[in-house]
Image (cartoon, rainbow, N blue to C red):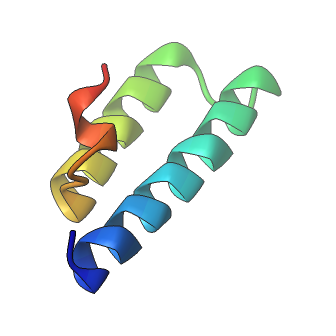
Amino acid sequence: MTKEQFANELNYCGLVAMAGAMLLHGDIDEADYTALRQVLLDAYKPVISGLRK
């Protein structure tokens, strides 16, 4: 894994964690979370975390 791939992985995981917290607190709904996650997948193209659904 390159340094860039590792950085993308960290950024993706951190932002998905924040989105998950927002979902749990009711700030966003499930549809928003799903859409946001897809945007993050497209933007960061994580090598490992992108394999999970």
Picture coordinates of residue 38 (x, y %)?
26, 38
Picture coordinates of residue 41 (x, y %)?
24, 47
In the picture, which quadrant includes the N terminus? bottom left
Residue at the (18%, 56%) spot, across then down:
45
Residue at the (50%, 51%) spot, across then down:
13
**In the image: residue 45, left or right of residue 20:** left
Q: Residue furthest bottom?
A: 3
Q: Report the number of discs.
A: 0
Q: Residue furthest front?
A: 1
In the rendered image of this protein, does residue 39 appear above or below residue 24? Answer: below
**In the image: residue 51, left or right of residue 37:** left
Between 53 and 32, which is closer to the camera in this rendering? 53
**In the image: residue 10, left or right of residue 42:** right
Picture coordinates of residue 35 (x, y %)?
33, 32
In the picture, which quadrant includes the C terminus? top left
In the rendered image of this protein, does residue 42 appear above or below residue 16? Answer: below
Picture coordinates of residue 31 (x, y %)?
42, 19
Between 9 and 22, which is closer to the camera in this rendering? 9
Q: Residue furthest right?
A: 25
**In the image: residue 46, left or right of residue 33:** left
Between 20 and 8, which is closer to the camera in this rendering? 8
Residue at the (52%, 44%) spot, across then down:
16
Residue at the (17%, 52%) spot, across then down:
42
Image quarter for residue 6? Answer: bottom left
